[in-house]
């Protein structure tokens, strides 16, 4: 879950608040849509990892939690997963930069008279 935080100095009913919220929600959309685009490749890499790592049977919930954490750490170090994360982050950053320009901010400010 992604959360957007907006400075308290903007009242929730103000034009500025709405403009900032719209801009920030565009960032959220970028995060989600880019992740969705990468989902098939990520799924493939994760499945490949688990095919090489047989299932473990645990007797206690605390062991399950620990095993899950260990798998998550192991997955982070798989070269294919590391490369995918790098590509995903780069693709997201390119899209974020397109909306974080002086022109974009000027357009957002023009929507409201109190800036």
Image (tube, rainbow, N blue to C red):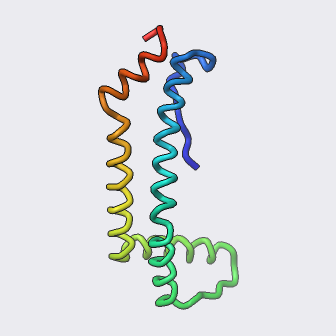
Of 73 and 80, nearer the camera is 80
Q: Residue at x 46, y 82 (%)?
A: 49
Residue 112 screen position, x and y as percent = 48, 14
Q: Residue at x 40, y 22 (%)?
A: 107
- Left or right of residue 54, residue 109 in this image: left
Residue 18 screen position, x and y as percent = 56, 23
Q: Residue at x 47, y 84 (%)?
A: 48
Residue 57 screen position, x and y as percent = 64, 87
Residue 109 screen position, x and y as percent = 42, 18
Image quadrant in which you'd find residue 81: bottom left
Question: Which part of the image, by quadrant, shows the C terminus?
Answer: top left
Of 54 and 25, nearer the camera is 25
Using the image, determine if residue 89 lies above or below residue 60. above
Q: Residue furthest top?
A: 114
Using the image, determine if residue 37 lies above or below residue 13. below
Q: Residue at x 47, y 90 (%)?
A: 52
Of 94 and 47, nearer the camera is 94
Using the image, determine if residue 11 lies above or below residue 91. above
């Amino acid at each position: 879950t992604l959360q957007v935080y907006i400075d308290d100095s903007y009242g929730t009913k103000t034009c500025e608040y709405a403009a900032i919220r719209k801009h920030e929600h565009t960032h959220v959309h970028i995060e989600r849509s880019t992740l969705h685009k990468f989902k098939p490749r990520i799924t493939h890499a994760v499945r490949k990892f688990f095919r090489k790592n047989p299932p473990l049977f645990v007797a206690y919930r605390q062991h399950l939690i620990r095993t899950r954490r260990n798998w998550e750490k192991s997955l982070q170090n798989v070269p294919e997963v590391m490369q995918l994360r790098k590509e995903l982050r780069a693709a997201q950053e390119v899209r974020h930069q397109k909306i974080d320009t002086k022109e974009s901010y000027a357009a957002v400010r023009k929507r409201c008279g109190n800036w």
